[in-house]
Amino acid sequence: MRVLSVIGARPQFIKAFAVSRELRTDHDEVLVHTGQHYDEEMSDVFFDELGIPEPEYNLGVGSGTHGQQTGEMIIELERLVDGTEPDVVLCYGDTNSTLAAGIVASKMDVELAHVEAGLRSFNREMPEEVNRVLTDHVSDFLFAPSERAVEYLASEGITDGVHFVGDVMYDTLLWAREEAARQSSILRDLGIEGTDYLLATVHRPRNTDDPDRLETIVSCLAADPRDVIFPAHPRTRKQLAEIELLTFAKRELTLIDPVGYLDFITLQANAESIVTDSGGIQKEAFFLDVPCITLREETEWPETVDSGGNVLVGADADAIRDALENPPVSASDAEPYGDGTAAAEISRVLSDESS
Ligand code: UD1
Ligand code: UDP
């Protein structure tokens, strides 16, 4: 099959590492980067260190309002689909790049494959929830990372084309764990000895764009006696500057630029606890069996909470402090996200379809 894969944001590069590797053995893949993320440390670093194929096209869309960003992607992707005539458009997750791919494929009557289908936070105020629901509803192949995702789809009347394949980020992590141990020097670079540190990331608009929430989170982290490694997403750095918290954050935390994947995996694997509002990081903490304190009220990865190893604390100061003092401990060895062969399964399903 000729597969046009659309990626654009940091976690999608990490997912594409596993999937492109498999797709390129059995299919003809054209990789398109929308340009949603463009800073060196938000984009190029992943292609360089993971050896992801260089995208055949970069749409260079960049940042903007939701309408501007998604609209420009739609215009450019439509041209590209017209010119490259793929059998299937494949997209990942829940970003604006995902939605743009979904709209273009469905309107141009090209089959659409959605990797990470069926996830739900049930919070429609999150742009990601809107993106994933809409994309699922126009997809022909729905690659679900968990059985629960399959159930959510069924509850919305979607059963055709649904395949439980497991989570492609687990595929990437299995490869990266050994590679990170071999290659990463981040602990030495940051002067970290032992595991007596916290790793924190924040980037959800609900946290970054609400000054009270952002201040509460940063104050709780600053009050912890341990070193806090905080690789700041550009959105977060901008907002910290905006509300005049950047100097405080730089003084109280180890505030650094975002790091490459192998460095980030190393920081995660060795941390005492992880504090985050990221989707992917909740899962990686689960795979690495590191306590995860999630700065959100709900999650699209509920299995991580069910395991006992992840706790949802929102931006509630008491709940954050309590979780920092009494970190959640996983009491389960369940493997709800497959066995690390999700990418191969995706490629196989597409092959079966074309034969
Ligand atoms: C996006 C996704 C989110 C995902 C996240 C992964 C949407 C709606 N959101 O959020 O689901 O979890 O990516 O990290 O698609 N910026 C830069 N340099 C960059 C990229 C962004 O400075 O390379 C700044 C810009 O000021 C931009 C802001 O970050 O306006 C937000 O970027 P954007 O891609 O719109 O959303 P994210 O918050 O990154
Ligand atoms: N990540 C990284 N460097 C960082 C922060 C995160 O490589 O400085 C990786 C992390 O390991 C995970 C992914 O980026 O694989 C998560 O991306 P993000 O939190 O931006 O998005 P989300 O998963 O919430 O959509």
Image (cartoon, helix red, strand yellow):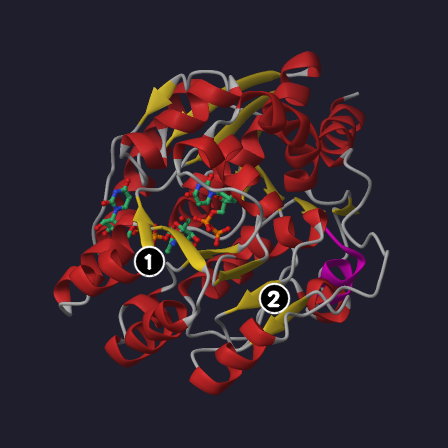
Amino acid beneath label 2: Arg
Q: Main secondary structure of the magenta part?
A: helix
Residue that carries the numbered disc 2 in the rendered image: 120
Q: Is residue 348 left or right of residue 54?
A: right
Q: Residue at x 23, y 59 (%)?
A: 251
Quarter occupied by residue 194: top right
Estimate the x, y position of residue 224 in percent, counting from the top left.
43, 69
- 355 or 311: which is nearer to us? 311
Q: Secondary structure at mark 2?
A: loop
Residue that carries the numbered disc 1 in the rendered image: 253
Against 124, residue 6 (above or below) is: above
- 203 or 187: which is nearer to us? 187
Q: Is residue 164 left or right of residue 208?
A: right
Name the residue furthest bottom: 318
Magenta segment:
145-153
Front: mark 2 or 1:
1
Q: Quarter of the image for the N terminus: give it.
A: top right
CB of mark 2 within 8 Å of CB of mark 1?
Answer: no
Quarter occupied by residue 137: bottom right
Amino acid beneath label 1: Leu
Q: Secondary structure at mark 1?
A: loop
- 127 or 41: which is nearer to us? 41
Give the mark, 2 or 1, whose residue is nearer the N terminus.
2
Q: Residue at x 54, y 54 (%)?
A: 196
Estimate the x, y position of residue 240 in percent, counting from the top left.
21, 63
Q: Is residue 149 magenta?
A: yes
Against 259, residue 96 (above or below) is: below
Does the numbered disc 2 mark a residue whose Cβ is under 8 Å from ligand 1? no
Q: Quarter of the image for the C terminus: give it.
A: top right
